Amino acid sequence: MTKVTASPGACAHGGWTRAWLCFGLLAALGCVSVEGGAVEVSWVVHSSGGYALSGCGCAEPPIDAIRLDVRPAAPAEGLASLSYLFGCSRKRGATPFEIPPGRYAVSITALDGQGQAIAAAVTPPPRLATVEWGKPASMDAQLVVAPCAERCANKNGRCEAQ
């Protein structure tokens, strides 16, 4: 069995065969499967007083994850509702390129550590997004409003701004 290794300058020397091999390796490693479009979303968590919370754990109860729901805007044969989970502290998430092209109602939900929706966390209503093949549909930043945990409040009882 032959071991293939490449030094930083290997693609620059050695003729067309080596150049095509290097190009093929780079292309294979840098590609993602595209079977539809994608949705990108970001969020920020604020207290009801309008202050940005220093972290998702400063919400009461703590927000563990954000669920992104992607539902067809109108009933259409073959289009299913999809859900994706992202850690809240990431503050952003992107789906794989697997969503069939079309119009979707996109929403987020704050979840606790058991995966249950947090009733006290207010999120925006669904927003319409057009998903196109091979392209990410970027949503505006979403505001999650949640009560401040007492452990994160300052001496005046208000959540500290970030």
Image: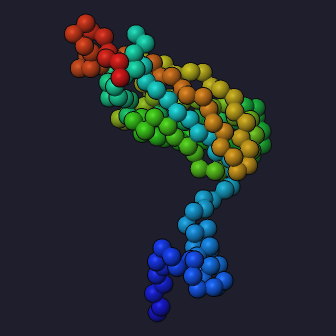
Q: Quadrant of residue 22?
A: bottom right
User: Is 161 drawn above or below residue 129 in the view shown?
Assistant: above
Q: Is residue 61 visible?
A: no
Rendering coords of residue 146 (x, y %):
41, 19
Rendering coords of residue 123 (x, y %):
52, 22
Rendering coords of residue 68 (x, y %):
55, 36
Choose between 84 and 154: the one closer to the eye. 154
Q: For the view shown, which residue lies furthest in the top direction? A: 156
Q: Is residue 64 left or right of residue 79?
A: left
Residue at the spot 23% in from the left edge and 20% down from the top edge: 151
Residue at the spot 48% in from the left edge and 19% down from the top edge: 122
Residue at the spot 63% in from the left edge and 59% down from the top edge: 33
Please name the colour scheme applied to the rendered image.
Answer: rainbow
User: Is 24 drawn above or below residue 156 in the view shown?
Assistant: below
User: Is 88 drawn above or below residue 23 in the view shown?
Assistant: above
Q: For the view shown, which residue lies furthest in the bottom direction? A: 1
Choose between 108 and 154: the one closer to the eye. 154
Residue at the spot 68% in from the left edge and 55% down from the top edge: 35
Choose between 12 and 32: the one closer to the eye. 12
Quarter of the rendering occupied by the C terminus: top left
